[in-house]
Amino acid sequence: MNARQANPWAALGALCLGFFMILLDTTIVSIAIPTMLRELGAGLNSIVWVISVYLLTYAVPMLFTSRLGDRFGPKRVFLAGLIVFTGASLWCGLSGNVEMLIAARAVQGLGAALMTPQTLAFITHLFPPAKRGPAMGMWGGVAGLATIAGPLLGGVLVDHFGWEWIFYVNVPIGVIAVVLTLLLVPDWQPKHSHSFDVLGILLSAAALLCIVFGVQNGQQYDWGTVFGGITVFEIIAAGVVLMIAFVVWQRFNKREPLLPLQVFSNRNFSAGTLTAATVGFAMTGMFLPLVIYIQSVLGLSPTMGGLLTAPMSLLSGIIAPFVGRASDKVNGKYLVMFGLAALAAGLGIIAWQATPTSSAWSFVPALLVCGLGIGCIFSPMSNLTMGSVAPRLAGTASGIFNTARQVGGVLGSAAIGVLLQARISASIADEATKAASQLPEQYRAPFTEGIAHAAASTGEFGSAGGPSPMPGLPAEIAAQAGKLATEVVHSGLTDAARVTMLLPMGVLLLGVVSAAVMRQLKPSWETPAPAPEAAAA
């Protein structure tokens, strides 16, 4: 099928099904974290790696995979990624330990990296500029809905079938997406002959791996030596140096750099790319403290935890298409700025409201504010960022834009994970010291040491019951110590979650500033209109 025979909306629908599956997997794991902590016998840092490694292998190859679409055809690369992603999802569900699961998630991320750049490239190909707003609205609605719907679907699957089914569910969806892509998506062949920047790929991958490894594992190694005398800070510094070397190489690579720096001379593209990174950081990071709090402190099941976020998901999905249409008529940067500010405000309200005894459903208004913000972000942000890019750079630009969002997600997952672990240890230790004063003196030190050990492992916090009381205590002391231990854990986790949520709020405010730089521009170039059969829909 070629572009003349394709219905652009049907083709976009098929592509969005695969895109939905990709973004679903960036958040569906979050709701299963307490369950996976228990059933896999893993620590919080290992489970955070299940999230981070997917985002890392998703982000790093994306600039390269966008070039593959230009050379071999977006449909063919999209299909290859869809098959890899679906097969890796089956592998994830079959994993019997956390190490195997991390490896499978890495392969899953590679499949996602092959697919994502092709979706935006197809939008610029199938739709003329005047009709691109509604198409971006559909794309943005899918993005917002999938990113937020993950916890609800994940909760139902975890409660009724087990954590493995958050991955198994991708298999039938993937098969359907493959069939629809084969039938509905045109085999567009840009046939641009690209050279591949192997050194750039290696430098960027090594840089991000060092930075993410250092940040995320810092708490685990107490910010000291990792191996062979090499410290955490030296690994992070090496990552920064490699990233600088990557940028310098891109500047002096005269053939075809992985990251063409000239694309950043476009003001909207530069500001939109930074904004996308802040969105990725916040939306990936916000779920980890929220899920730990609502399940381990408030005692909600995964299904009820997912149901709590459902109104946010529903609202964001409903308003995104309308915002996409509005972005064709008004300056979209104000919609983006409002969305970012609303999302930050919603997180701030949640942090302000959270106590160990809060009613879970009292957070619905704040979550609705978050949903309103999310629904206002994606469509105008994508339209402003990509709408001013010349067609010859569409594939490369879409790769950079999506990479920025995923790099933000990688850094958000790592930074939020390490901050949450640090705050759990510190907050619970402080609460344990206060609570120990209520016990007889001879039991105080063992009590605080036991709580501190549980806080360090974080594996005790997979349920709302708190850590097990100390063995060998007299019955009356054991009951008191058990009650105090639960109160300590709940207070400490609440404080840790509240403080951790401040980080994505601050990053979102940076996004407001970067979005303010964007401006409503009419393209200075003309995009050839698709054939009448493709334009009609």
Image (tube, grey):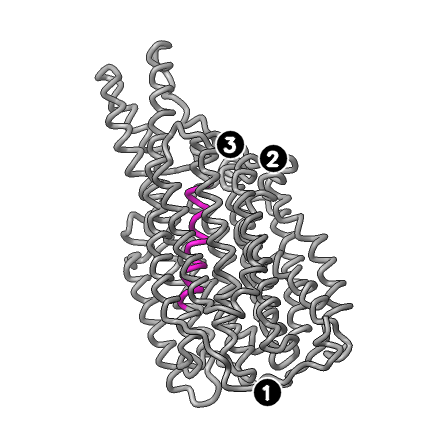
Frontmost residue, 276 versus 473: 276
Q: What range is drawn magenta here?
A: 274-290
Callout 1–callout 2 Cβ contact below 8 Å: no
Q: Residue furthest bottom?
A: 254
Residue type indicated by callout 3: Leu
Residue linked to disc 3: 300
Q: Is residue 277 magenta?
A: yes
Q: Is residue 260 above or below residue 161?
A: below
Quadrant where the N terminus lies? Answer: bottom right
Q: Look at discs 3 and 2 and give the one toward the viewer.
A: 3
Residue 281, quarter of the rendered image: bottom left
Check disc 2 and report its element: helix, strand or loop.
Answer: helix
Q: Please give the name of the residue rendered at 42% of the width and 54% of the height, measured from the top-left corner.
A: 282
Q: Please give the name of the residue rendered at 32% of the width and 62% of the height, measured from the top-left corner.
A: 236
* Main SS of residues in magenta: helix
Question: Would residue 498 appear left or right of 523 to someone viewing this image?
Answer: left
Mark 2 burial class by Cα count in 10 Å: few <14, some 14-19, many 20+: some
Residue linked to disc 1: 193
Callout 3–callout 2 Cβ contact below 8 Å: no
Q: Is residue 144 above or below residue 472?
A: below
The percent coordinates of residue 181 (x first, y second) are: 72, 66
The percent coordinates of residue 11 (x first, y second) are: 70, 68
Question: Would residue 380 appear left or right of 162 to someone viewing this image?
Answer: left
Check disc 1 and report its element: helix, strand or loop.
Answer: loop
Residue type indicated by callout 1: Ser
Residue 468, quarter of the rendered image: top left
Residue linked to disc 2: 159
Q: Earlier in the sequence, mark 1 or mark 2?
A: 2
